[in-house]
Structure formats: structure tokens, C-alpha cells
Image (cartoon, helix red, strand yellow):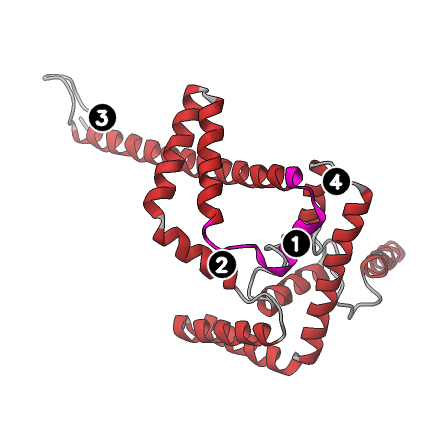
Amino acid sequence: MNGQLIGMLVLSLTWAGAATVWGEDAKSDEPVLSGPKADRDQGRRRSADGGKGFGGRHRGERPGDRILAALNTIGATDEQKQKVREILAEQVAKHKKFKADNAEALKAIREKMAAAKRDDDKEAMKAAREELLALRKAAGLPAGEQRKKAKQFRKDNADKIKAIHKKIVAAKRSGDTDAEAAARQELRDLWKTSGIDGGDVMQQIRAVLTPEQIKVLSQMRLDRMSERAAKRRANRGHRDGERGKLREGRRDRAGEGKEEGEPSQSD
């Protein structure tokens, strides 16, 4: 019994310590790395910011973690990192003010979203999201404009983008680095005509970086996109292969595809 009490005390002190590290108390809006509060915060962030937040954070990530990690990769100076931290801190303050000023409205929207999800009502969910975006736009926060622009641009230039991707894949297969670099530059030039600038926050961050650093970041993003596309293709091929095996198994059991006189498994 004493052992159980000691265990419970240690556990409660652990959670208290986690709350002290990342927030002032159990009701703090600051994120924690793991545990029940992290799960609750993550759910609240998803509904309060339309599902993306700062670039769609995973559990335990704080605002700007990915950007700061990227700055380390490109060798940004301490001064540049500090300026970026200040820009991100300003955004966090804006979001906190937004949540405080619109607490009742956000609560109502969350309830509408929950009801729409429960009833599987896509139209109601869409209307609730639009209401949330309108609220964010009125507060001067990102409201999905960049995503809408990007979606429309991809739709309008689908053939061009597909042709450039084919060039990149062909160049990678043949090991022609010059052709690959030229194709990637062509893709960058095409996206420059889209009018998508990443929003005010990204513009502020870009102003802190050098042109060469921005180029490296763009290349990193393209590489990530290529890796994701390659994984999708690989997974698709694997699934097709599995289906092929199943088809062969069915034919074999039915006695198809066998030489005359050779018994099937069903015989």
C-alpha cells in the first residue's frame, strides 16, 4: 500500500514538474511535451486554428520549432535566429489575444464542428470552418488564403507541373544533375508567377535571411516533396504487387494458368 502511495506521489510530482516547465499551471495555454494535457491542448489547437496552426504541428511541437530547426540546417547566425524567434513570439501573442477576445465565439464554433462530425454533416462542417476563417481574418490572422491560392494554381497549371515533375524524375534516374537542377529551377520560376508569398509571417522571416539561405530552404522543401511523392509511388507499387499475388493465388486455386495435366491446389 505504501508503495502505491509513493508511486502516485511521484507521478503527480512528474506532471506538476512538466506543467512548471512548459506552463504556469494546469490551465496554462503553453504546450507540454506529452501526457493528458498535451493531448487536450492538441485537440484544442486543431479546432481553434482550423487544423493547421503553425504549419500543422505534431504533438509536443511548439510554434516555430520546424522553422528554427531549418535555420540550424542552413547555418543561420544567432542574430538571425533571435529575429525569427521575435517574429514567432509576436505571432503567439496575437493568437493568444485572438483566443481570449473570441473565447465564446470559438467555443460555439467548436460545438458546431463537433455536432457536424458526430452527424457526418459535411456541409455543416464546411460552414463552421468558413465561420472560423472569417473570424481569424477579421483579427488579422492567417485564414487559409495561401492554401486556396495554391490549390487553384495547381489546378490551373496541372499539365505544366506534371511535365516538369517528369523531367525531374527522368533526370534523377539518368543521374543528370544539371538537367535536374534546370527542371527544379523551372518549377521554382513557375511557382513565382502564382502570387503565393507564404503570408505576412513568411515574408518577415524571408526579410531576415539572405537570398542564398532562402534558395537552400526552397531546395529543402522541394526535396521533401520529392521524397513524399517517391514514398507514395513505392507504397502504391507495393499494394499493386500484393494484389497481383492475390490474383495469382486465386487463379492457381481455380486451376487457371496451369499446364495441361498439372493438378491445381484445389485438386
Question: In the displayed structure, would residue 146 be above or below residue 154?
Answer: below
Q: Which mark is residue 147?
A: 2
The residues tagged by marks 3 and 2 sit, at their Cα atoms, a distance apart of: 55 Å
Looking at the image, do the residues carrying marks 3 and 4 touch, with CB atoms under 8 Å apart? no
What residue is disc 3 on?
265
User: Going by the image, does 255 lie left or right of 113?
Assistant: left
User: The disc labelled 1 sits on which kind of residue?
Assistant: Arg
Identify the amino acid type marked 4: Ala
- Is label 2 in a helix, a strand or a loop? helix
Q: Which disc is residue 76 wearing?
A: 4
Tally the marks.
4
**Circle 1 sits on which residue?**
59
Element at badge 4? loop
Q: Quadrant of the N terminus?
A: bottom right
Q: Secondary structure at mark 3?
A: loop
Q: Amino acid at mark 3?
A: Gln
Residues marked 2 and 4 touching at CB (< 8 Å): no
The numbered mark at residue 95 is none
Please identify, in this view, whether the residue under mark 3 or under mark 2 is nearer the observer.
Answer: 2
* CB atoms of marks 1 and 2 within 8 Å: no
Tell which circle, 2 or 4, labels the residue nearer the N-terminal end: 4
Which quadrant of the rendered structure holds the C terminus?
top left
Which is closer to the viewer, label 3 or label 1? 1
